[in-house]
Amino acid sequence: MTKPLRLGIAGLGTVGIGMVKIVQNHANKLALRAGRPIEISAVSARDKTKDRGADLSAYAWEDDAVALAQRDDVDVYVELMGGHDGPAKDSIEAAITAGKDVVTANKALLAIHGQALAEQAEAAGQVIRFEAAVAGGIPVVKALTEGLAGNEITRVMGVMNGSCNYILTRMQDAGLTYEEVFDEANALGYLEADPQLDVGGIDAAHKLAILASIAYGTQVDFDAVDLEGIGSVTIEDINQAADMGYRIKLLGVAQLTGRGLEQRMSPCLVPDTSPLGQLQGGTNMVVLEGDAVEQIVLRGPGAGEGPTASAVAADVIDIGRGLRLPTFGQPATSLVKARPARAAVSAPYYIRLQIVDKPGSLAKIAAVLGDAGVSIDRMRQYGHSEPSAPILIVTHKTTRTAIDEAMEGCVATGLVEGDPVTIRIETV
């Protein structure tokens, strides 16, 4: 009989219990697809007494994740605890040292320590698999490392945080403010214990940094992601963007340019008729563009027990089959350190200004934009409240540097009340 592949699962939260259920409910399918039985030897979590809705009595229990990772009856260490340091990092390092393969859903750990862990694993002849770390149930890591391996990737783009997409679409559909929908999402349990990980774009930026590494053969560099969350997006911007044919999304974009690797996670406008523009609720979407394949769109649930555990199971099955790939798609020692580039690729921008309502104001603002090299495509005025008026501008393609210079110039005229709002318009 073929020797079973024995798992040690650390972390019995939503995803961990989801993986336990898959092993328990689909044992025959897993064995046929992996070419060998898949079994759980031992588990670990903070509280042994907690009722998790699954029978764990057949598995050995370890209070210490490092001890679990080092057990002789564990072939694959499955880390589902989370956290970029502490027990998660220590236990994965221990597992590699003990000759175990690793499956993890820990995006923060990989975004910060991925290069060092990949080098350690590959030097030891072990593999680290992490499909569940990016976009939940969407097989985007597999798409980049395998399905699109023959392409030069030209752009990676996507909505990678379902909580933010829920907030933005709920604001538009219900006409509610950001603060109102934030409180609603928090009450429903849609946000992390630290909500800034979601609404600040940090969670999605971790994912983008990982995908950029795979797509461009570069070392993971989370610190180089140009990061802006959704906290400054107002219902007025959402409504006015919609009136102009756009929707606002927290969009991650990575592309390699002549100036370096551009990685940004920020609110962007996308055409409302595009796949990204039509994405509703907590769903994720990743768009991959390559020189041979052109464009493919992957859409699906980005979180939750079933979808994320499904991705974990896929990695386990691949290991059972004997598939052994470098962590980021090519040997870790061959990954180069990219030169960061800030919004090097030009694009149109949406600008909202509250301008003092007096003769010549608009002409002066237009002149400042022109002096900075920013050309106006469309301009609209919405409402009118003395002594100022809101002005909306859509520019022709320009650079982030030119937009920043133009906004500084507009403020310097003394004709702008409050802070200007600028949002990039992404071509999809």
Image (tube, helix red, strand yellow):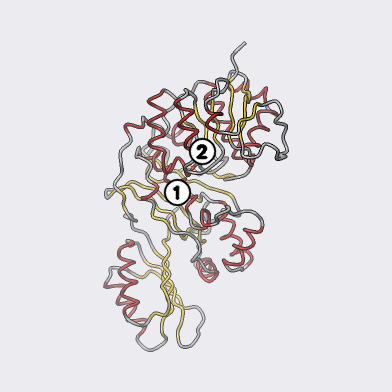
Q: Secondary structure at mark 2?
A: helix
- Tag 1 secondary structure: strand
Q: Position of residue 61 (x, y in %)?
A: 64, 29
Q: Measured from the top left, where is residue 250 in percent x and y?
A: 49, 56
- Which residue is at 70% across, 38% downward? 49
For the residues labelled 1 and 2, say whether their Cβ atoms are less than 8 Å apart.
no
The label shown at residue 34 is none
- The mark that comes first in sequence, 1 or 2, is 2
Q: Would you identify the image quadrant in which residue 423 lies?
A: bottom left
Quadrant of image for the N terminus: top right
What residue type is disc 2 on? Pro
Along the horizontal axis of the image, is 310 left or right of 200?
right
Viewer-proximal residue among 153 and 21: 21
Residue drawn at point x = 35 percent, y = 82 percent: 414
User: Residue 6: x percent and y percent?
Assistant: 59, 22
Q: Which residue is mark 1?
A: 157
- Disc nearest the viewer among 1 and 2: 2
Percent position of residue 187, x then y: 66, 59
Q: Which residue is mark 2?
A: 87
| Residue 66, above or below 4 | below
**Relative horizontal placement of residue 279, taking residue 206 as reference (left or right):** right
Q: Amino acid at mark 1?
A: Met
Tell me: residue 183, above or below residue 45. below
